[in-house]
């Protein structure tokens, strides 16, 4: 049975729970306050071997906490996890040897070392034999398009180059499982795209690596992942393929409308319309505009009436569009909250 | 291609290579911050010079009758220099590790380092050795300069014995260093801590005066500190021309401290690491 689980799943989290206790005061008068944050609330999760699995959730949902538990640098309060068949609590060394981790932010490398020096250093820490390391480092540098600048200090790199180098570092020892925490955070769109393609095509499809990535960009999860788990306030609210998740909306069109002067009264009126199933409201922009997404049957036939309600209530309409449901819509529907806040 | 993991002679060999690569990396990084190098080179020199000049002002000559009565030598320049050298080495192991660890928390590289499947102690040792190595460089510079200016009566033939004696003391320093590294991992505070400790040690250790001038209460504390024995032992070897058998009495407590502090250091570091892993604050600055 255990063997079976090992073969099929590369990551299995079992009832993981993590509660942080805030601390007050400075050293040496620090004490734990009674305030607690439940970062993970009995999380169960399994990632199949070879799968690209996305963990999608808003800020503070618990994504980083989960990744850090899987990578053995946070100890959970309850539950445990198997990574590549090894228990993160009982065999942390074996887990570490079989995972590659890219953490969000870009400070995981030595800025005062060159790219090559960084990779050589970590190859030793991962006990990659010298000959193998040399070959692998030049392979990875050219795969990442960094070979021309391999002997430059990392502090001279752009954010995107550092992220590429961080990925190269993570796969230096050819691990079976990759844990990527917001791998495109803060990168410009074109760089993000190239990183996404690299992760999907090269690492997942070509090299067959099992990948768990976290993100709060819904289209990132939608485009890349075989399966997605929604996480909100430490709980997994749904797990499925992006297609199946979007099918949960129950309709294939969404009316997106950007208005000003929105208040609860208007919203109640809109919600009261017989053909409206549900609606999601984003946080107001600074200029007072708010994006509202209306989930309704037969958008064409009812668009006029919706517009009427908003204008009668004194809202100004800035834009109106009919869109396909996104993962964000599913998230809103499941949690009543918006992803990008 | 698969990384080896723990166990056996090969595991130990790999860990030794980790120590080596950490040492190398620390040195490379160190040399890339030229200002630090300059400060490190100058600071101990200024310190030792001011002590020596102060001594000359009080005594009026390079020889102190009073010191000769208290210790086995009246040459306070050599007396102080050896005290300084040994304590510099002691300090470099005592807080070299916690300092470097704190640096990695600051630069954000601690988590990625601790994600690697190697022993934390190999990483710490690499840091301790690199800090010892840079210290040796500056110490060598100090000795040369001071002996040029003031003249130094060191029994260089005894140098190998003195180094051997230092090796006897080293494990206890490393053990204390592990403990400090553990504490710093959690408390996220280094300089205030170390500034206080080094001032305290400056008082308790027989660096520029013999222990016999300390009030008895303080002297008891001095005898609890391994560097005390290292300084006394190496000093008798280097300037009083004692034989190895004469310093055996100082080596015995050191061996006891070695066992005690190494095991305490490993335990304390492991416990503190577990603590920060539970709090989730390993890489926090
Ligand atoms: N070490 C810690 N001590 C106290 N609270 C913490 C700690 N780490 C995280 N938290 C809190 O736990 C919750 C979950 O944090 P986590 O970083 O796992 O979320 P996340 O989904 O990664 O968010 P983000 O998208 O902002 O990265 C947040 O409320 C966060 O403030
Ligand atoms: Mg996060």
Image: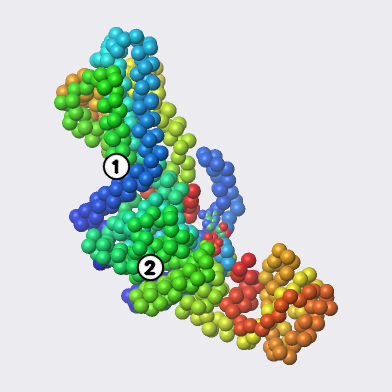
The residue nearer to you, when weighing B239 against B62, is B62
Residue denoted by label 2 = A144
Q: Residue at x 45, y 72 (%)?
A: A194
Q: In what quadrant does ligand 1 lie?
A: bottom right
Label 1 marks a residue whose chain is B
Residue B81 versus residue A26 in the image, above or below: above
Locate residue A158 relative to residue B24 in the image: left or right: right
Quadrant for the N terminus of chain A in the image: bottom left
Looking at the rendered structure, the number of numbered marks drawn on it comes to: 2
Q: Residue at x 27, y 15 (%)?
A: B75
Residue B186's x, y, as percent? 46, 46
Q: Is the residue marked by circle 2 packed among few (<14), some (14-19), or many (20+) residues within 10 Å?
A: some
The residue nearer to you, when weighing B239 against A154, is A154
Residue B91's x, y, as percent? 35, 34
At mark 1, the secondary structure is helix
Residue B282 versus residue A141 in the image, above or below: above
Q: Residue at x 71, y 63 (%)?
A: A286
Quadrant for the C terminus of chain A in the image: bottom right
Residue A283 appears in view: yes
- Look at the numbered disc 2 and say if its residue's Cβ is closer than 8 Å to ligand 2: no
Residue A98 versus residue B274 in the image, above or below: below
Residue denoted by label 1 = B129
Residue B231 appears in view: no
Q: Residue at x 34, y 9 (%)?
A: B60
Query: Looking at the image, which residue sits at the far front?
Result: A148
């Amino acid at each position: 049975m255990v063997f079976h689980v090992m073969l099929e799943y590369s990551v299995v989290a079992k009832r993981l729970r993590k509660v942080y206790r805030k601390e007050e005061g400075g050293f040496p008068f620090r004490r734990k306050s009674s305030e607690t944050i439940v970062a993970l609330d009995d999380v169960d999760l399994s990632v199949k071997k070879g799968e690209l699995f996305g963990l999608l959730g808003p800020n503070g949902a618990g994504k980083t906490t989960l990744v850090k538990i899987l990578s053995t640098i946070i100890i959970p309060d309850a539950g445990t996890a198997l990574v590549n068949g090894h228990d993160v609590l009982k065999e942390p060394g074996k887990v570490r040897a079989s995972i590659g981790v890219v953490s969000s932010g870009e400070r995981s490398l030595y800025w005062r070392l060159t790219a090559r020096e960084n990779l050589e250093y970590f190859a030793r820490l991962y006990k990659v034999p010298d000959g193998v390391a040399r070959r692998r480092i030049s392979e990875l540098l050219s795969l990442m398009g960094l070979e021309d600048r391999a002997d430059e200090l990392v502090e001279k790199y752009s954010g995107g180059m550092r992220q590429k180098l961080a990925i190269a570092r993570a796969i230096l020892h050819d691990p079976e499982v990759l844990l990527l925490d917001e791998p495109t955070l803060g990168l410009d769109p074109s760089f993000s795209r190239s990183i996404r393609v690299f992760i999907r095509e090269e690492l997942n499809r070509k090299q067959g690596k099992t990948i768990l990535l976290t993100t709060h960009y819904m289209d990132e999860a939608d485009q890349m992942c075989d399966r997605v788990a929604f996480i909100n306030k430490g709980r997994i609210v749904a797990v499925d393929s992006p297609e199946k998740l979007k099918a949960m909306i129950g309709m294939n069109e969404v009316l997106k409308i950007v208005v000003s002067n929105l208040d609860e009264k208007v919203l109640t009126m809109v919600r009261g319309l017989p053909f409206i199933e549900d609606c999601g409201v984003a946080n107001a922009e600074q200029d007072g505009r708010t994006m509202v997404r209306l989930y309704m049957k037969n958008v064409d036939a009812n668009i006029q009436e919706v517009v009427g309600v908003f204008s009668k209530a004194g809202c100004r309409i800035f834009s109106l569009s009919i869109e396909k449901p996104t993962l964000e819509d599913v998230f809103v529907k499941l949690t009543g909250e918006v992803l990008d806040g | 291609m698969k990384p080896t993991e723990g166990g056996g002679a090969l595991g130990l060999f790999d860990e030794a290579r980790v120590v080596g690569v950490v040492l190398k990396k620390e040195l490379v990084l160190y040399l890339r911050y030229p200002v630090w190098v300059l400060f490190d080179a100058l600071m101990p020199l200024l310190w030792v010079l001011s002590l020596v000049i102060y001594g000359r002002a009080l005594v009026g000559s390079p020889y102190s009758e009073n010191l000769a009565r208290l210790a086995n030598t009246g040459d306070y320049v050599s007396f102080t220099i050896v005290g300084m050298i040994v304590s510099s080495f002691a300090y470099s192991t005592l807080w070299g590790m916690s300092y470097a660890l704190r640096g990695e928390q600051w630069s954000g590289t601690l988590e990625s380092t601790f994600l690697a499947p190697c022993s934390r102690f190999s990483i710490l040792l690499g840091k301790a050795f690199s800090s010892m190595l840079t210290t040796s460089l500056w110490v060598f510079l100090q000795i040369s300069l001071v002996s040029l200016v003031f003249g130094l009566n060191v029994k260089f033939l005894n140098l190998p014995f003195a180094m051997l004696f230092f090796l006897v003391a080293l494990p206890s320093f490393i053990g204390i260093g592990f403990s400090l590294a553990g504490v710093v991992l959690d408390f996220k505070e280094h300089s205030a801590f170390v500034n206080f400790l080094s001032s305290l040690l400056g008082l308790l250790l027989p660096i520029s005066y013999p222990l016999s001038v300390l009030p008895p209460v303080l002297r008891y504390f001095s005898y609890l500190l391994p560097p005390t024995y290292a300084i006394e032992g190496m000093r008798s070897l280097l300037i009083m021309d004692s034989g190895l058998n004469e310093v055996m009495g100082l080596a015995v407590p050191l061996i006891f401290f070695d066992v005690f502090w190494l095991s305490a250091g490993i335990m304390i570091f492991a416990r503190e690491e577990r603590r920060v892993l539970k709090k989730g604050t390993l890489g926090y600055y």
